[in-house]
Amino acid sequence: MFDAPTLRRLASEAVGTFVLVFAGTGAIIIDDLNGGGIGTLGIGIVFGLTVAAMIYATGHISGAHINPAVTFAFALARHFPVRMAPLYWAAQLTGATVASLSLLAMFGSVGSMGATLPSGSDLQSLALEAVLSFILMFVIMAVATDVRAVGQTAAIAIGATVGLEAIFAGPISGASMNPARSFAPALVAGELGSFWIYVVGPVAGASLAALCYRLLRGENGGRS
């Protein structure tokens, strides 16, 4: 049985991921229903602002990972207990799946439910997801784990990174950077054929970024 603090952290991750997927993929669905009224720029802004809002809302409770790749990278870099990682993954996937099911109930099966699908080759999207996730995780490591960075700007920096990457890379790979964000709509829409890209790419890119920042920072550069 989990203690109360652990349950609060897991609930926080579930809620944060729910909001991210509901708002972000909801924007894609509504954009499809309205004939492109929101557009790539609008969708990117929605994702970025939602991430920033959830960091402000839940960061002090659970760390606001809301992304299994981020949790994996934090654990790999020894900034997060390895034993907690599977619990965070379960909470994140649950929150994301409930969000996609809620959107399905509200709008029906529209626009592949906002699933991330490669518009070019699988290899192209895999490489792009890895690079995007590297950049995102590098920023996260800088603002969330290094005492030399200004902590209050973490949500703005991370949200802006997500938004910018979604705007310029969304048309190619979907700019997921997040296995939970990709899993839920793909599951609900039955579009799991390319899902592996959005696990391998983000996990590889985020892990490399976490280790790279740890090396660049130096042993005494920040807290663990």
Image (cartoon, grey):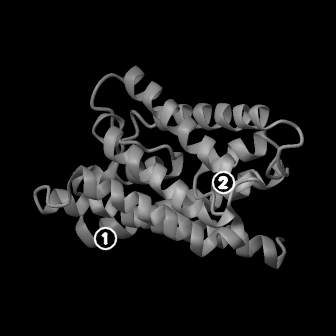
- Furthest toward the left, the residue is 35
Q: Position of residue 184 (x, y in %)?
A: 45, 54
Task: Give amino acid for label 1.
Answer: Ala
Q: Residue at x 41, y 20 (%)?
A: 123
Residue 196 visible here: no
Q: Is residue 220 above or below residue 103?
A: above
| Residue hosting label 1 | 105
Task: Give amino acid for label 2.
Answer: Val
Q: Quadrant of residue 215?
A: top right
Tally of numbered tags: 2
Q: Position of residue 208 (x, y in %)?
A: 66, 31
Q: Residue at x 39, y 29 (%)?
A: 125
Crowdedness near tag 2: few (<14), some (14–19) or many (≥20) residues, C-alpha within 10 Å = many
Q: Residue at x 56, y 63 (%)?
A: 155
| Residue hosting label 2 | 143
Q: Residue at x 39, y 48 (%)?
A: 164
Crowdedness near tag 1: few (<14), some (14–19) or many (≥20) residues, C-alpha within 10 Å = few
